Amino acid sequence: MNERPFDAKSLVASLPRRPGVYRMYDAEDHLIYVGKAASLRDRVGSYFSSRAQSPKVAAMLRRVARLDVTVVNSETEALLLECNLIKAHRPRYNIILRDDKSFPFLICPSGHQFPRLQLWRGTRRPPGREFGPFPNARAVKEVLQHLQKVFHIRNCRDSFFAHRSRPCLQYQIGRCSAPCVGFITPEAYGRDLKQAIQVLDGQGEEVSAALQQRMEQAATELRFEEAAQLRDQLAELQEVRTRQIATGPRTRDVDAIALVGEPGGYAVSVLTVRDGQSLGTVHHFPVSLGEPAETLAAFVLLQYSRTAPPAEVLINLSLPDQEALAQALASVAARAVRLYQPERGLPRSWVVQAEENARQAWRSHLANHDATAEALAGIGKVLGLTQSPARIECFDISHLAGEGTVASCVVFGADGAEKRSYRRYNIEGVAPGDDYAAIRQALERHGARIASGDRARPDLVLIDGGAGQLSAALEGLQAAQCSGLNVASVSKGPDRRVGQERLHLPGEAHAITLAPDSPVLHLIQRIRDEAHRFAITGHRRRRARRFRESVLEAVPGLGPARRRALLTHFGGLAGVLRAGVADLQQAPGVGAGMAQSIYDHLHPGAP
């Protein structure tokens, strides 16, 4: 073990045998690891004992220059503090969840006469009923689609709903009862919405019985058309209730979590069960140097720091601090949470299913990782780099006849796309359609961030384009005083066909051509295509925003804030164009004079 700037033996002897959190810092005072302990002296002492450590833990310990501790009252407090510190600082050697998206929910916001059901992500949810979390957005959309077919609940935005004069296509295809134009009473709509919520609450049998009774009553009273509609609703509802992978007790909410792998790399599969119905699995690939049980405990705590846990959390490993972890989950959920490793029955089958999914996901992940690592090594050899690139950044430009020019930067590494590091640059002050000036500006702004330390240095910068774009990119980096980067460009072949791409290097007169079936070329195509997609998406959003506001920008005295308020009030530019002077006056911040000015500008020559 290397010599340290602090006396590890004296430090360990000074620590109490009490619960707490310890933090390891490197020589540059960067926090590199956070850990919890039931006994700080025993846990920290285990790092500096004479026993052999795993290579990755030994590598971490060689970087430790300082260690601080925080003593707390219980293991539960230690768990929560550790989780908060990891989320706030993201230490290098702690577990890192690569996919940090929030889970999707299905919500029914309150405060509207005709509420709707909608998909929602994020921790800030509007007031109202919520259902979830779901494993992915597709599951939410499937549920929404079937509920709309059964109960005809609206799915349009409130701004769209408020300005309808006739029913939309959803009504024509039998997915909505058109409350926007009064085709259904608030009482009848409320009854349908209540039944949809009952289905989400797992009361599908009660809803079916109620629909059956209404159908029979309608048939008895010779209202055959209504009876036929109720019959169709029953059939659709039956399809909703039978589209499930596994069924348990009706009110059972469970998450089955299984971890496989070894220190340095794991796969975790989370099987979501709501109201006894399995909604599928979602996979994570946390990076952790800890043992499996320790990593699983950290994952569980991080998982439910985003959203409240269900009543039951099933795991495939026994955890040493399982009781404290259950108490921590209960404090987050504000109710009892049962955390256990099932041994038999349906809970055990859920865990087995999650474990099988985790193994399959890990095999696929390793195969993709190995293929990517091999392709990255091939890129290094083809371009003559001293080592395989671990971080590649690729730039592309998108515009329409020079309008709304956007430059994209996507990042790829050994684990594939690193979407958290993606960036876009809105290009201003260049001649329309001048791609060279656009790429020069983007690389100058990006290079300045790298030079200042705000952005990690890439091992390779790829430019979508030929030798001209490459030269422009080098000029931009030089202007930003960002030197020493490996830069190359990838252009389409003479026929602009896939597989004919050529690589251009600075100072090289001849381009590099790769075989169409080369893994190196396939990875470069994948990176280039992702940069192209990201650029087009940004350009379309920017162009749509400019189109929405451009017509109103010429109205004298109408500033950006009032333009946005006007568009929000009327649900878009089409609503503003339809509005009369009296309607315009109802918008926030628009008086009589401004309303007349807006109307005259939008309707020149009108009486």
Image (cartoon, helix red, strand yellow):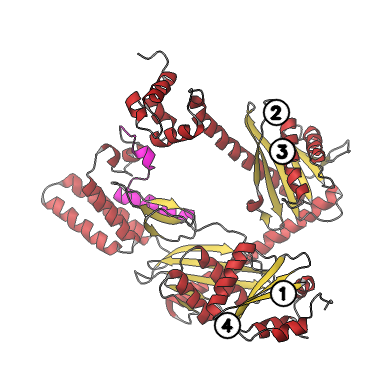
Could you say whether the residue bearing mark 4 is in a helix, strand or loop?
Answer: loop
Could you say whether the residue bearing mark 2 is in a helix, strand or loop?
Answer: loop
The label nearer to you, 4 versus 2, is: 2
Give the residue number, with chain letter if any, for mark 2: 430
The label nearer to you, 4 versus 1, is: 1
Q: Position of residue 400 (x, y in %)?
A: 61, 29
The label nearer to you, 3 versus 1, is: 1
Q: Earlier in the sequence, mark 4 or mark 2?
A: 4
Could you say whether the residue bearing mark 1 is in a helix, strand or loop?
Answer: strand
Q: Spatial distance from mark 3 to mark 1, Cα to Cα? A: 41 Å
Magenta stretch contains residue 147: yes
Check the picture and name the quadrant holding the N terminus: bottom right
The one nearer the camera, 115 or 189, is 115
Q: Position of residue 283 (x, y in %)?
A: 56, 63
Q: Is residue 355 visible?
A: no
Q: Spatial distance from mark 2 to mark 3, Cα to Cα? A: 11 Å
* Three-letter residue code for mark 1: Leu
The one nearer the camera, 221 or 475, is 475
Q: Is residue 178 left or right of residue 537?
A: left
2 and 1 marks in contact (CB < 8 Å): no
What mark, if any, has residue 442 been given in the picture?
3
Q: Position of residue 305 (x, y in %)?
A: 52, 66
Give the residue number, with chain letter if any, for mark 1: 67
Q: Quadrant of residue 413?
A: bottom right
Magenta stretch contains residue 278: no
Q: Which residues are magenta?
A: 137-166
Q: Earlier in the sequence, mark 2 or mark 3?
A: 2
Q: Is residue 276 left or right of residue 449?
A: left
Seen as rendered, the residue at the extreme left is 221
Give the residue number, with chain letter if any, for mark 4: 320
* Three-letter residue code for mark 4: Pro
